[in-house]
Amino acid sequence: MNTDDLIRSLATEVRPVRRYALGRRVALGIIGGAVVTLALVAAGLGFRPDLSLAMHGFSFWMKWTYTVSLGILAIAATIRLARPEAPPMRWLWLLAVPILLLAGIGLGELADTPTRDWLAMWLGQSWLVCPWLVLALSMPIFIGLLWSFRRLAPTRLRAAGAAAGLAAGAWAATLYCLHCPEVSAIFVLTWYSLGIGLAATLGALIGPYFLRW
Amino acid sequence: MQQSEDQLRTWMTGGMDGDAAAHAALLRALVPMLRSFYRRRLIGAGDDIEDLVQETLIAVHTRRESYDRGRPFVAWLYAIARYRMIDHLRRQRATVPVEALDEILVAEGFEDACAARIDVGRLLSQLSPKQARAIRDTHIEGLSVAEAAEAAHIGESDVKVSVHRGMKALVARIRGARA
């Protein structure tokens, strides 16, 4: 096609772009995926029976603070990487803050616990399945973000995939908290982080293939 | 003639507000910019240049949401153009591995390139209009001497002389500024 004709045909359908359209699109992808993940948690795993009681306790909010803060930072990185001229992100060191805070709480727990109980506290009841469930539950959110990216312009595909995977993993872990009864900080620090890390790694691996445009 | 960043951004935001005429004006203004961008980087690519220009225009159109109204437009445009070029090279010969994409984008330093463009604009504005235009047409827009002569309605030798004298004046100015 002749370039002038192309321009003419493109200019016939000029839909307005709302302010913050990029943020809205990313939010829509995450929320769409999160609804599926929430349904999977509710139907497949079941909410923890003591959920309303647990929501008054410290460990529940410790877990949510950890996963939500990772999730927010990951969304910010995803939005940056959805622009073609993604600037350097020096603020990513902030990811270390929730990790170090949780590690601090974990050290406090270890100090208060007799050494013979350390292993049981670290492994909890569900260490074998926790990372894999977080990874599996992150998939709907990751797919939602792949949908978001279809109208966006990532140019650093591996980094964009990793950020999307991190966001998907962190928000999947947040919803998984509604099921998971584990209470110790070192459990969350190890097995939740492993699941979230697996999601980010998977995103980095498949990003270049699924995000190409 | 390349439009200014301000003009391009005005058209872009106009198009994003739904103004079809502004959008069309933007896309038309991008054509020569993109042609010279690809011509300088893909020597001997021939017909591929026009394909790349069109693909880039389509990307500018369909991926407008990734533009932030508060940021420089030209940096956004060239980031997309550079991505399309790397994708083109990979499709053709697979000489650029997917893994190296990040590094290439960083190493190419588009911000520096944009800054350099702005500096060039400032330098050229110190020359006579004829010299500035001759240099811009032949060295930035990528026109041949014959094309530049026709566009400016002057003789080919006039273009060559203008480029030569303009360059000499620029070199003198830069040396003077450094000394």
Image (tube, coloured by chain):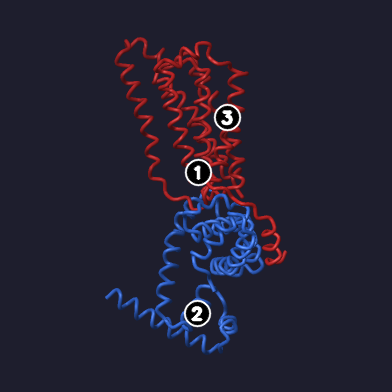
Chain colours: A red, B blue
Q: Which residue is mark 2?
A: B133
B107 over B119 or under it: above or below: above
In the displayed structure, does residue B119 sit left or right of residue B150? left
Q: Quadrant of the C terminus of chain B?
A: bottom left
Pinpoint the chain carrying mark 2.
B
Pinpoint the chain carrying mark 3.
A
* Observer-nearest of B115 and A107: B115
Q: Mark 2: which amino acid?
A: Arg
Give the residue at x 57% y 48%.
Answer: A18
Q: Which residue is mark 3?
A: A34
Mark 1: few, some, or many residues within 10 Å (few <14, many ≥20)? many
Q: Which residue is mark 1?
A: A79
Give the residue at x 44% y 72%.
Answer: B121
Give the residue at x 61% y 43%.
Answer: A210
Distance from the alpha carbon under mark 2 to that under mark 3: 56 Å
* Observer-nearest of B126 and B170: B126
Distance from the alpha carbon under mark 2 to that under mark 1: 40 Å
Distance from the alpha carbon under mark 3 to that under mark 1: 17 Å
Q: Mark 1: which amino acid?
A: Ile
Mark 3: few, some, or many residues within 10 Å (few <14, many ≥20)? many
Q: Mark 3: which amino acid?
A: Ala
Mark 2: few, some, or many residues within 10 Å (few <14, many ≥20)? many
Q: Residue A102: x, y in percent? A: 37, 25
Classify mark 1: helix, strand or loop.
helix
Q: Residue B156: x, y in percent? A: 55, 87
In the displayed structure, does residue A134 sit left or right of residue B174? right
A139 over A120 or under it: above or below: below
In the displayed structure, does residue B43 sit left or right of residue A88? right
Pinpoint the chain carrying mark 1.
A
Q: Residue B88: x, y in percent? A: 61, 58
* Observer-nearest of B137 and A29: A29
